[in-house]
Amino acid sequence: MNQKAVDPLSGSIVSSDDEIDLGALLGRLWKLRALIVGFMIACVALVIAFHMARGTLSSPQRIEYAIALTFAQQSGELRYPGGNLFSPNDLKAPAVLTNVRDALGLDISIDDLSSAISVRSSNSLLESAERQLELMLSEDKTPEGIRKSAESELDNLKLESQRYITISLLLDDLSVSKETGIRLIQAIVDQWVKISTDQGLFNVDSSHPVDLFSIQQSGNLINIYDDAEKYLNSLSVAVRSISNISGTESLTIEGKSLSDLQRDIETLENSEIGPLREFAYSNSERLASEDPAIQIRLLARQRLLKLESERLNKLIASYDQAIEELATSFNQSDTRRNIDPGQGNLQLDQSVINSLLQMGNQLGAVESRNELFKLRTQTVEKLYSLEKEMAILAGVNDNIYGDLDPANILNESLPYIESQLNVFRAQLDSFILAYREIILNGGSQVFSAQSAPLPRGGYIMSLRKLMMHTVIALVLGLMLGLFVALVRLAVTSARS
């Protein structure tokens, strides 16, 4: 008598009184142990691989922080906005490292900290392009035209790569944790920005007056008003320079903007210093009676200004002559191009070539004329300013001021002028400090982080941490394996 084969997984695990037979269930799960163990092994492998890729299980040997400097290059070199040459080693200057160590409270010598930090110019994308161009240049079969283009592009990439900086910190040399290393490398960059800003390296204007304006009681009045004029001009130049910086147009200090400060400076020049200075020179003969050195100074100054005026007039005449010659050359070239006939194909081709060459010469002549015209305009403006100064020094011949005492009038106005100049200087310092705060609070004006500080290198950190992740993976795999096994049992029982 034949008996029908029975699937060992298809037996019922529910008794006649609707209760689950745990013994039968465990027995059938045991028969699917290979499936459950497979899920456990797969979960362990996936979890460990994930944490290894994230660096969770590794002990980093170094921390790398990549940044891009946002201030522009000047003349093929990377310079601070103030004009000083930038060097990557500025980020690990002793002053920077000392402030960082003291701020974080680290018990590390400056020499050890400096040797554990390296700063280099690097960018992975640019380095890859540089290697490709260098490989192209190393091949003898590269055409000459492509070779020249590759050399030019390689030089441009090397200049551009100077803007990308990578700071590396060796953790083993300092015996610090990964978290401390990340805080340390970020603090180094922030401290470099702070110190460079305090030193004025990120200030476009670095020529503003530092000392207060003070009147020397023993000095003559003409010298005093000359000094006041120079001091006011330096304040005006500084205000204009700061106004050209992006983001400063909206700065307001005690209800005043940079435009308001510039207007106040112009008002003081037009209403006080300028007229009184001219008044002092106009009465130079009377003032010279008290101080003969005034007359000597005036004569010497007038002589120097006269020589400079003659030089500027000759320079303007040379510009006029050059512009006239370029205009004549342009007209003659245009006439030759119009009357040049074309006879035959060969002559026509030569005519076209000549026309193209003449057009190129004409374009060059136009550019040269524009440049000469700009230089002439600048020279004329200098001459006008010079003539104004000469007129002030010359003074007036008739006594238009009557019996006024110039010394008393000039002395009475000096305290107000001194006070206003120092008020303007204090206001300018406030704007400079506010701009520095913008730089410190907005790092994007100095650098931009290409990524967060990244741990690099290392091996398995500890068996304890590895075992913890392994146990979690085993539990997860066991749960998934049991779930899949139970689903399979249910499907098998339904089919039977």
Image: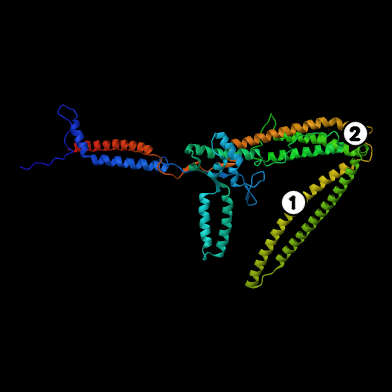
Q: Position of residue 259 (x, y in %)?
A: 71, 35
What residue appears at the point 24 percent right and 37 percent down from the top-left corner?
A: 485
Q: In front here: 64 or 487? A: 64
Residue 420: quarter of image = top right
The residue tagged with tag 2: helix, strand or loop? helix
Could you tell me which quadrant the N terminus lies in?
Answer: top left
Asked if residue 398 lies left or right of residue 474, the reply is right
Using the image, tell me which numbered label, if any, was put on residue 406: 2
Q: Position of residue 81 (x, y in %)?
A: 65, 44
Residue 25: quarter of image = top left
Q: Position of residue 69 (x, y in %)?
A: 58, 44
Q: In front here: 405 or 86? A: 86
**N-terminal-most mark, 1 or 2:** 1
What residue appears at the point 53 percent right and 49 percent down from the top-left corner?
A: 123
Q: Is residue 334 above or below residue 74?
A: below
Using the image, tell me which numbered label, if any, was put on residue 374: 1
The amino acid type, in three-letter code, at marker 2 is Pro
Foreground: disc 1 or disc 2: 2
Residue lying furthest left:
1
The amino acid type, in three-letter code, at marker 1 is Lys
